[in-house]
């Protein structure tokens, strides 16, 4: 067997390296809801409106091999035109207001918006600052808030599951 065939060979087991049983069971339930509501997968576009990067790190961790959320049908995309869900992090600054609105308008219907982290949900410690407009829902409609500073990957997965379970009510 040559080296190229070893590199191209698919792994037999597609499990993540996480031992978090709550995360795994939430992911499996989320997979069923995604299949039921969206078909095969959902695409998430992350929008940073002025955060301290804590929530972005947790969102990025979802795609890392430890959690590997693509096996549950969740992908992160670079363009809002390919997204089903906007995951907005950080309190909205004056400089990011227009970019957030344009991203929201570029996302095709039906679109869902989740505010990820305390700053996005309430303004957090920056709420009284002259440089910010406020939480995400002061600029665009928000379907779900996932609090936490930062929220854990398991909390984000539970939030996505709640959003999928309520998606048919819209």
Image: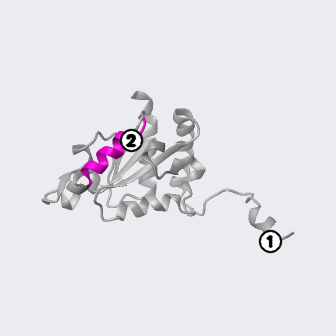
Q: Residue furthest right?
A: 1
Q: Residue furthest bottom?
A: 3
Nearest the viewer among 27 and 74 is 74
Left or right, 94 with respect to 169, comes to left
Nearest the viewer among 44 and 118 is 44
Nearest the viewer among 85 and 106 is 106
Front of the two marks 2 and 1 = 2
Measured in 3D between alpha carbons, the distance from the residue under mark 2 to the one under mark 1, in whole angstroms, is: 44 Å
What x and y, as percent, mark residue 41?
55, 42
Circles 2, 1 touching at the beta carbon (< 8 Å): no
| Badge count | 2
Kindly state the secondary structure of the residue where label 2 is placed: helix
Q: Earlier in the sequence, mark 2 or mark 1?
A: 1
Badge 2: residue crowd in 10 Å (few <14, some 14–19, many ≥20): some
What x and y, as percent, mark residue 59?
44, 58
Is residue 112 placed above or below 71 in the rendered structure?
Answer: above
Q: Residue furthest top?
A: 169
Is residue 2 placed above or below 31 in the rendered structure?
Answer: below
Tell me the residue at 53%/39% (across/down).
34
Q: Does residue 7 appear in this view?
A: yes
Q: Which residue is mark 1?
A: 3
Give the magenta range: 96-108
Colouring rule applied to residues: one colour
Q: Quarter holding the C terminus?
A: top left
Numbered circle sitting on residue 86: none
Is residue 49 placed above or below 143 in the rendered structure?
Answer: below
Tell me the residue at 13%/58% (across/down).
128
Q: Which residue is mark 2?
A: 106
What x and y, as percent, mark residue 37?
52, 33
What x and y, as percent, mark residue 138?
21, 44
Tell me the residue at 87%/69% (across/down).
1
Is residue 19 placed above or below 138 in the rendered structure?
Answer: below
């Amino acid at each position: 067997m040559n080296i190229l065939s070893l590199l191209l060979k698919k792994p037999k087991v597609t499990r993540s390296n996480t031992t978090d049983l709550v995360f795994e069971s939430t992911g499996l339930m989320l997979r069923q809801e995604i299949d039921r509501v969206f078909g095969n997968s959902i695409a998430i576009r992350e929008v940073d409106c002025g955060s301290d990067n804590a929530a972005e790190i947790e969102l990025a961790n979802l795609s890392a091999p430890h959690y590997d959320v693509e096996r549950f049908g969740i992908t992160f995309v670079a363009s809002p035109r390919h997204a089903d869900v906007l995951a907005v992090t950080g309190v909205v600054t004056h400089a990011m207001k227009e970019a957030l609105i344009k991203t929201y308008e570029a996302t095709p219907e039906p679109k869902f918006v989740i505010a990820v982290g305390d700053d996005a949900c309430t303004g957090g410690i920056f709420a009284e600052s002259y440089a910010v407009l406020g939480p995400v829902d002061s600029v665009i409609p928000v379907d779900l808030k996932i609090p936490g500073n930062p929220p854990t990957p398991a909390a984000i997965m539970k939030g996505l599951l709640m959003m999928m379970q309520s998606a048919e009510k819209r």
